Image: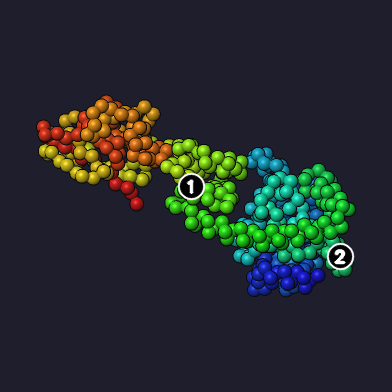
Amino acid sequence: MLNKVRQFIERHHLLDVSQKYLVALSGGADSVCLLLMLKELGYKVEAVHCNFNLRGEESYRDEAFVKQLCSTQHIELHLIHFDTRTYASLHKVSIEMAARELRYNYFEQLRKDLHCAGICVAHHEDDTVETVLMNLLRGTGLRGLTGIKPCNGYILRPLLCISRCDIESWLKSKGQAYVTDSTNLEADVMRNKLRLQVIPLLNQVSQGAKINILKTTRHMTEATAVYEKSIADALTRLVKDDTISIEQLCQEPSPECILYEWLSAKGFSSQTIESISDSLNQLQAGREWTSATHQLTVHRGQLVLEPLHAELPSLRIPETGVYHYNGTEKYRIKKEEGKQIVLDCQSACLDAEKLHFPLTIRPVLNGDRFQPFGMKGTRLVSDFLTDVHLSIFDKRRTLVICDANGEIVWLVGHRPDHRFCITDSTKNTIIISREKLK
């Protein structure tokens, strides 16, 4: 058994004998086995125990047991108490989630403080089977069928190669006691129901049920490696500046998979991604979806993705000078004698006598109208921006500068208003220039 764990550690490059590791020690069979096996294999370990104060006297029984075990084994123990119920109430999460967050946040902080190379936890083969079944019941993709990974960041799982039965047999051979969490014996939550009711029934239906599920996880792990390489190649080929051509996407074997890998990391739900995929050929320009962090739209046959931006502010400009806007741009407003012309879309030359301060820089509003230079009559700004093929996101970022009367004098970066432009009779020119800040 010990050799099996040693080989698993070596195969997955989990531990280094020159480093120190924390072992999450609950006092149950799994964690006791993990601690003693790692010590016997020659790894430098220190134990950490969390008392969540959820099981009354049983919590203190577990604490006393791990203290005695670590004292006997001459292993350093780090002990902490949590007010789990208060944390769950304050953060509006379940007791289970509260315990998980408290546990892993503490583990990570302790790992850093003690300069440990990783945190070892005692998940084993049975946990993998339960996890796969839970994922199946909730609905999952390839990754959900790969089970539990041996390594996830600093979280290390050296016992994934052995079963709960193996663990108990090894402890029995050592004459080593352990404690049992009574809540694990209650078929109240999904994992416990699977462990206590479903998996035993599956083993009755098929004697090799657990072994075959584990085989499936290994096959799915290999298939996932192929899948991820294929998806990565497709994303490299298709995504240009956070845009994807819908036509090219539709030519891929599985547009939905590509969309999922592109968008799920940006907070879009599986349901939203499936809806987009199902209607790729009927998406209308301007259609928009939003996640907690990003926004997606259809523009000129492409899906365009970008982070959500805060609403743009307004800035009052009382007189000529240099003004910084929103930490991203700088506007220089100066007055020149005579008629001045600057041929630059980032500048506007306006008749000083027609312009009335204070000016205001602000985002475009619904219903804004102006008279584009060289045209007769006014137009909706939104129509003008559509004509120059701006996406809905670019439209929202577009700014205007208005005079004291609220009239738009410059659609920034595009066109000044004809009514404020210089003419043959212009005596003085106001030059407004925009510069992006680095």
Q: Percent from the top left, x then y, of residue 33?
A: 79, 64
| Of the two numbered discs 1 and 2 in the rendering, the one whose residue sits closer to the viewer | 1
Work out whether 78 lies above or below 195.
Answer: below
> What's the residue type where badge 2 is placed?
Ser
Mark 1 vs mark 2: which is more N-terminal? 2
**Is residue 91 found left or right of 242 in the rendered image?**
right
Q: Which mark is residue 247?
A: 1
- Provide the residue designation for mark 2: 169
Other-residue count near label 1 (Cα within 10 Å), few / some / many at <14 / 14–19 / ≥20: few
| CB within 8 Å, label 1 to label 2 | no
**Is residue 130 found left or right of 175 in the rendered image?**
left
**Is residue 417 found left or right of 107 in the rendered image?**
left
Q: For the point 30% across and 44% down, which residue is it?
A: 330
> What's the residue type where badge 1 is placed?
Glu
Q: For the point 56% across and 43% down, which residue is it?
A: 277
Which image quadrant for residue 129? bottom right
Give the camera-side residue of 245 and 192.
245
* The N terminus: image quadrant: bottom right
Task: Indicate the secondary structure of the residue bearing disc 1.
Answer: helix
Task: Indicate the secondary structure of the residue bearing disc 2.
Answer: helix
Look at the image and tell me whether residue 90 can be seen.
Answer: yes
Give the camera-side residue of 220 and 81.
220
**Is residue 254 found left or right of 205 in the rendered image?**
left
Which image quadrant for residue 90? top right
Give the camera-side residue of 293 and 182.
293
Q: CA distance from mark 1 to mark 2?
A: 59 Å
